[in-house]
Image (cartoon, rainbow, N blue to C red):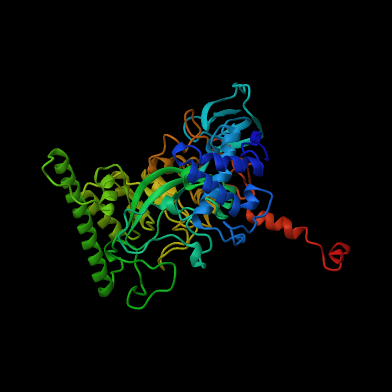
Amino acid sequence: MGGAADGLPPTRPDANQQKKAVVGVFDLDGSHQQKNKGMAQRLNRDFPSMLDSKPALKTKENPVTRRPGSKTCLQRLVAVCSLSLPIIAATGVSLAEAGTSVFIRNVQIHAVVGGELSVGSVLVEEGIITALGPEIEAPEGIPVFDGKGGQLFPGFIDGHTTLGLVEIPTVKGSVDTRETGRINPDVKTELAVNPGSHLIPVARRGGVTTVMVVPGGQFVTGTAAVMNLDGWTWEEMLVKSGAGVRVIFPKMATIPSQGPHQEGLFPKNNLRGGKEETKVAPAKKKKEKEKLRRLNELFDAAKNYRQAKKAAKKDSKIQPPPEDRRLEALLPVLNGQMPLIITAQDVPTIKAAIAWTEERQLTMVLDGARDSWRMAPELAEKKIPVLLPSVLSVPVREDEPYDTSYTMAKKLHEAGVLFCFTTGSASSVRNLFHHAAMSVAFGLPYKAALEALTINAAKIFGVADRLGSIEVGKDANLILTDGDPLEVRSHVTALWIQGRRAELETKQERLYRKYRSRPRPGSSKAQSR
């Protein structure tokens, strides 16, 4: 696990190599040699621990020695660049390309699509699956990984999560799920994802290699992104930007949210869906009508903005409209290039959302719909995919059966609805397979559960040509398990993302080992301290 043969980056060169790389990067343009020389001197002064073994000295040019941690933002940026440049120079390839080829042999291949293969091998070259089968041989120079008869699956995909946006929900500084304001279609979620989140390795432990990161908010929250769970930066993690614009649709009715009824909002004898669904309280109804009016105004403005741009493009005499980033973000939606991810829970709201998108000829993905199973035939007929809300939850109505959430997936599958599993959070992504396992226990076919964890999600997000199955030409996002991945007793023993073997150790495991080896009070080792 510690060298290039294991698919991990090589060790960092020493300080002298770093110093040369930093100084060299400022010598690319001869017209700035004097300026670059000064920058190099400042680097030598302000980063003694990184660029040189000697401490900074007080001189005329540097009367005050800087303490560690007192660097400016620019200096921090240069420091980061200096650490990455020598690695690239030493290997000849970028970090994203390092260790992305491997020959995985002696594994039971579960391709998800097509027929199942017996024990065989998978060849990955530069992050892409190039061959698979029982008789292929490892090319010369490709590292070989012995799967020892384990089960090889495509990596799981979580269809709605805030992973990378939230670290500790109760610490505000670690929560970046929403922007100020209520209408933010131009927000790009991938820019806020933290590649160093401690929750990412935990999610990988559960077999999840890819997630759809969805912004939070109250109305038009922003643009979702499909991200791999490996990379030094969000750019390296990004699979697809602009996977959909999320809209929390105005409520036409309300169902209780897994808690006691609120006086005046939900009646005590709450009936099941349809015409007798709970009505929104008058004050709430007025607020929701206002949201619907603003939503219509927003998309009318986007439509007019598109027409004005087209007119200006055709006729140079026509002045183009001033650039509006919010309206620009909605143009792919209007052009059918991007879906709307509409969050709607109850039957009346789902029906209103469907009618609204059909009227405007927009593509829709239904999100968070607890009542989606009640409208399964209509959703299948209109080919509206569903991001299934948490299966591991209790019923939302007093008179619903205890297994309402557990059987949602089965009912959608029987109706022919395309759906995928989601967790909707950051810390629970590791439990994604539990949602599929519980659905299987309550009637969902096993193959359909695997599809909902893999290829279905890829189809919904428009990345099925890259992810979701083990096929030649697709990205090598793979997991190796020592048993059925839907069994709680099974473990993920190895995981690859774009052919690069990813670390499975978590912070919790490191802490466990640390305190497991702690000397007992009164022991000779403890007394020696």
Seen as rendered, the residue at the extreme bottom is: 263
**Would residue 208 be visible to someone looking at this image?**
no
User: Residue 281 placed where, x, y %?
Assistant: 28, 73
Which one is in front, 292 or 447?
292
User: Residue 520 placed where, x, y %?
Assistant: 82, 65
Looking at the image, is 226 positioned above or below residue 219? above
Which one is in front, 335 or 35?
35
Which one is in front, 49 or 266?
49
Quadrant that contains the C terminus: bottom right
What count of labels does the image hold? Answer: 0
Which one is in front, 68 or 352?
68
Quadrant that contains the N terminus: top right
Looking at the image, is 65 positioned above or below residue 330? below
In the rendered structure, the answer to whether residue 284 lies left or right of residue 118 reads left
User: Residue 144 placed where, x, y %?
Assistant: 65, 29
User: Residue 381 placed where, x, y %?
Assistant: 29, 44
In the rendered structure, the answer to whether residue 268 lies left or right of residue 403 reads left
In the rendered structure, the answer to whether residue 288 lies left or right of residue 391 reads left
Q: Which of the 4 image quadrants contains residue 149?
A: top right
Seen as rendered, the residue at the extreme left is: 317
